[in-house]
Amino acid sequence: MAVTAGSDPVITRTSVPDPGPGEVLVRIKAASVNPTDVMTWRRGRFPTGETTPMVGGYDLAGEVVSIGRGVTILQPGDAVAGMPRFPHPAGAFADFTTAPARHLAKVPAGGPGAAEPDWGRLAALPLAGSRHGRPWWTPPGSRRTTRF
């Protein structure tokens, strides 16, 4: 879904990207709209200067489809959530996007009796869970512990 200033979002066709070194390809299961997305639609540019039309979306939840060279912290089939590349757009309003593996949190299965994670809730977590510019997940190599 591409956004252009002053107009409604438009469904467009794009190719599925290949993950680069240190990146993963994510099949988007859910994306949430945060205030920066709305600001982008109104102003026609992202806070970092990228201009529309562009596939927007910051907050996402999905499944890792493939991994790029050097990725060891995630594997195909892993459920993930995050706000990758922030403050640059993550392309969460697409079916697929690439993201640095270290910008995503691996999330547990959906709980007792659940077949899948609650994708919608996971997509709403990244911005809402951030505190004072600190990420809600534990970056790889950190001594902190992630709890969901």
Image (cartoon, helix red, strand yellow):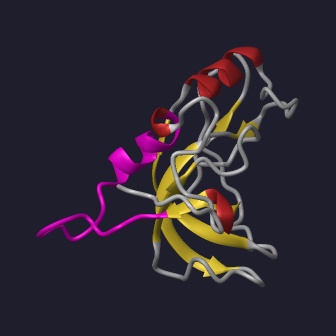
Quarter of image, res 73: bottom right
User: What residue is at 81 percent from the left and 76 percent from the top?
Assistant: 21
User: What residue is at 68 percent from the left and 48 percent from the top?
Assistant: 90
Q: Which quadrant of the rendered structure holds the C terminus?
A: bottom left
Query: In this image, 124 relative to 19: left or right?
Result: left
Residue 63 place in picture, x, y as percent? 48, 69
Quarter of image, res 56: top right
Residue 59 place in picture, x, y as percent? 55, 43
Work out whether 92 lies above or below 50.
Answer: below
Work out whether 30 lies above or below 63.
Answer: above
Look at the image and say whether residue 121 sits in the magenta stretch: yes
Q: Nearer the viewer, residue 123 or 13?
A: 123
Q: Which quadrant of the rendered structure holds the N terminus?
A: top right
Quarter of image, res 109: bottom left
Q: Nearer the viewer, residue 140 or 9?
A: 140
Residue 122 place in picture, x, y as percent? 39, 50
User: What residue is at 55 percent from the left and 82 percent from the top?
Assistant: 75
Magenta residues?
106-127
Work out whether 30 lies above or below 26.
Answer: above
Look at the image and say whether residue 115 sits in the magenta stretch: yes
Residue 68 place in picture, x, y as percent? 73, 80
Q: Nearer the viewer, residue 139 or 108?
A: 139
Kindly give the residue lying farthest to the left in the view shown.
113
Q: Nearer the viewer, residue 9 or 93?
A: 93
